Amino acid sequence: MTLIKAVRGTRDLLAPETELWNYVETTARRVFARYNFGEIRTPIFEDTQLFARGVGEETDIVSKEMYTWEDRARAQSEKSQSLTLRPENTAGVVRAYIEHKLGETGLLQKLYYIGPQFRRERPQKGRYRQFWQIGAEVIGPPSAGSESPLRDAEVLEMLASFLDELGISGWTLVLNSVGSSTDRPRYVAALREALAPVKHQMSEDNQRRAETNPLRVLDSKDPDDEAIITTLPKIADYLDDASKAHFAAVLAALDACGVPYEINPRLVRGLDYYTRTTFEFTHGGLGAQNALLGGGRYDGLSEMLGGPKAPGIGFAMGLDRLILTLQNRDAAAPPEQVQLALADAFIAPLNEALAAPALALARELRRHGLRIELGDGAFRLKKSFETANKLAHNIILLGEDEHASGILTVKNFATGEQTKIPRDALAQALRPPD
Ligand code: HAM
């Protein structure tokens, strides 16, 4: 029989590696809480139109990479509907913002999410078809300060602090401004004009992009097209005064709090909703897929989805890529959180009849917050010791005598010491030092 395997581009995350995932997620929750963010959880599938309208029909994500299906009507009252596994979470958050009228609070909404996203990309190291993002969005009516460049700088400073707190060094913050919704069409028109006489010399991919979405030519990695790309007009020359001032204010705030950055005029990003500030944090250790995270402003997205004016800025980090970076860093000496912690004790019932009393003892000790492994009454003493030595700091022997007297025999593997401990003092004796 052929074995069924995980689908290409998806993977199982096993313990103890999942300890590292939990550690990164816990650190994110702790850091984001300091900036007063709350958590949002949106559905994993949405109406296909949400992504078509929000992310953009011409983007690679929508035109090539979505997992979309026609969901048949199950009842007469239901219509069939085109549904899509979310390829990203910003569109879902803005949909929820509109649907729940969060703008009516008059306050900024500061929301973070942690969850899987799905894109049918060619799998390689750091690129999967099901991958995880930790992201956040700051969105609200302009009266709540949602357009302020201070929001951009605060989000970027939070990311720098988060990476520092995780112990990830060697990142580069790359920034650009893609201008307002009126700057963009002027720039795209200039790009088209500049590309028209030279595009036939470019790769097939770029010839197609020059037609459908000229901005995408800018982030092409094709070395043969590089010479032409460097001669193309720069978006900075097409920004209106308000966009220029906004970008300058973001940079000044970053300078004030000492977050280093580089400006890359070619950073346009692959989603259509961006306006003004766009950014990525890259890391050299990741190879071709070097973007640890990406984000930017999307001042018109709510209106594109039929909602009120609600400027916003946010980011999403590739959790898979954060983990790879930590694993590369720690290859020689994995930190504590990558190893599954040893149990405080392994309870070894010395015969089958003592298996049930052993479970009762385990329940008692676990209720005291101890981490307990339960052995098998069918094990011989030698096997119990061997297994316990791999899994726990101590072994508790539960034989007929111990069961009758309530005095347990405990051996500590580190010291080799064997002691008799009354049952009611056991939890205290096993408790690891703080
Ligand atoms: P994005 O650049 O498409 O932006 O994705 C953000 C991050 O998700 C990337 O920098 C990368 O680390 C990770 N990522 C993307 N695709 C994959 C993949 N196939 N495998 C592994 N990791 C991947 C967004 O998704 C926007 N929603 C970000 C945003 C939030 N902008 C504003 N708010």
Image (cartoon, helix red, strand yellow):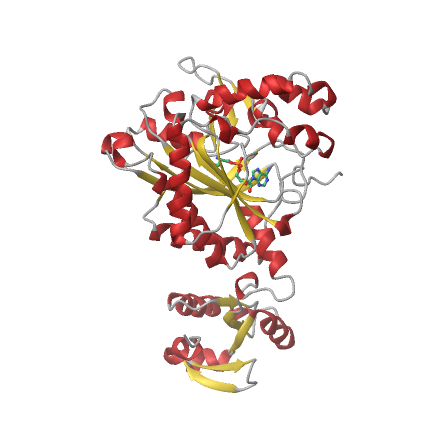
- Depth check: give the residue in front, 384 or 179: 179
Q: What percent of the width, then of the height, locates residue 139?
A: 34, 35
Quadrant housing residue 378: bottom right
- Decide: is 341 above or below 289: below
- Depth check: give the residue in front, 39 or 361: 39
Q: What percent of the width, then of the height, locates residue 113?
A: 42, 42
Q: What percent of the width, then of the height, locates residue 250?
A: 40, 41
Q: Quadrant of the C terminus?
A: bottom left
Horizontal side of 293 relative to 26 (left or right) equals right
- Depth check: give the residue in front, 71 or 397: 71
Horizontal side of 30 relative to 2 (left or right) equals left
- Depth check: give the residue in front, 378 or 260: 260
Horizontal side of 423 relative to 222 (left or right) equals left
> Which residue is rendered at x = 40% and y = 21% of the image?
304
Q: What percent of the width, then of the height, locates residue 132?
A: 53, 42
Work out whether residue 275 can be spotted. yes
Quadrant housing residue 193: top right
